[in-house]
Amino acid sequence: MDMDSVIADVASAVGLAEGRSGVSDVLRAIARSEPVAVRDVSRMAELPVPIVAAVCNELRQRGVVDRARPVRLTQAGRDLLAAQHPHLGGSCQACGGSGIAVPGALAGLASRLESAAAGAPAAKPELDQTHCTVTTKIRRVLAMHEAGALLGARILLLGDDDLMSVAIAAFAAALGQAGGIERLAVVDSDPDVLGWAGDQIAGTGVDAELVEHDLRRPLPGGLAGGFDVACTDPPYTVAGAELFLSRAVTGLAPEPGRHVFFSFGARRPDETLRAQELIGSMGLAVRALWPGFNEYLGAGILAGTSHLYHLRSTARAGPLIGGDFSGPLYTAEARAAASRPYRCARCREVHRVGPGGGWPRIAALQAAGCPWCGGTVFRPMPLQPQRRTK
């Protein structure tokens, strides 16, 4: 069997929304870094951990991936892949592919931010909070600085469990430019986050406006149209992207060329397309995109990474959501609103689990067994894109 046939067979067996290209991405990630943990393959291939695990299991059954852990190819797998896609190793080792290398001169800043992060309020999963690493905070600030979107700018942070306000203030202070931050406003619904950020910013010389506000409601009037830069790392749902980008655009001054730094995780193809359509629909142009730029502590289903988009406003910039928002926003809410298909590993029959499905949870289906063959092993399939309603 040649590699093309293996890839097509595995894509069909897993029911991969990305099709054969998704299997190819997994194989290339393994080949570049073997032996490698499934979580790291997930990050490189931009696929959820359970999907990568399912792909690897199918590849093991076909003799392409070794049965040992961490994940590695068999010699037969290497030979098949090399014939199709020779590896040359051209990735940047200095910056990890992010395009931003942290200067050694900022070692003191890293220590300062490590201390701030150590005492920060715990992440709240129900709000899709997952704290980014200190290196990510510094790289984000450097990206803003290199884009001319830091010193002399009016900056709006929409959500700040990552404590980017602290990173911005500490960075400016380290450069002796604390007065160069013209305006820094932080909007968050979590008073614990705002309180801790305020304590850490105190003494840096940067004045920060800390606003407790639920972004399901429109921005307070004093924030609308008053900023050169907006930064947001929203819930990783399409609804989260639409809402937080709408609030970001609302906060920008009306002149073209304002900046938005938007962090968003790798999604299924239809969801990625929808998120990128939203960007264009709001009159924002993509200036740069750094895949896997953000790294998070406590890596979850997306292997603890997300992309960083640098967007610029145009004369057509405007929000898609101007008023209140009442739909599902966070990941748990989105999951609760839809059932998910699972495929039986034995007979290939598909069953739906969750609201409107035959079983409330996957554990119930596993306990009952497949009604067709009695099997107890089920593989998650991609969620079907839901119709949007206004």
Image (cartoon, rainbow, N blue to C red):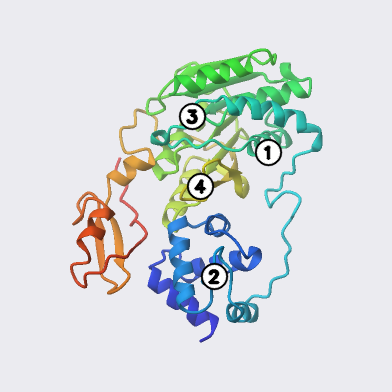
Of marks 2 and 1, which one's residue comes earlier in the chain?
Answer: 2
Spatial distance from mark 2 to mark 1, Cα to Cα?
A: 30 Å
The residue pinned by badge 3 equals 122
Q: Say which element carries label 3.
A: loop
- Residue on which disc 4 sits: 265
Instruction: Provide the secondary structure element on which disc 2 rests.
Output: helix
Which residue carries the number 2 mark?
24
Do residues under tags 4 and 1 come within 8 Å of each other at their CB atoms? no
Give how far apart the Cα atoms at labels 3 and 2 are: 37 Å
Q: Quadrant of residue 73?
A: bottom right
Tell me what residue is drawn at x 42 percent, y 36 percent.
125
Q: Residues within 10 Å of mark 3 (few under 14, many from 20)?
A: some
Report x, y in % for residue 172: 72, 23
Taking 61 as reference, is 173 above or below it?
above
- Any mark on residue 139, and which? 1
> What percent of the width, then of the height, locates residue 153?
67, 24
Label 3 or label 2, whichever lies nearer to me, is 3
Query: Where on the picture, by quarter, is residue 350?
Result: bottom left
Tell whether label 3 touches label 1 (CB within 8 Å).
no
Between the C-alphas of marks 4 and 2, the distance is: 20 Å
State the SS at label 1: helix
Number of marks in picture: 4
State the residue in front, 82 or 280. 82
Mark 4–mark 1 Cα distance, whole angstroms, equals 17 Å
> Which amino acid, by three-letter code, is at mark 3?
Ala
Looking at the rendered image, the quarter that the C terminus falls into is: top left
The first of marks 1 and 3 along the sequence is 3
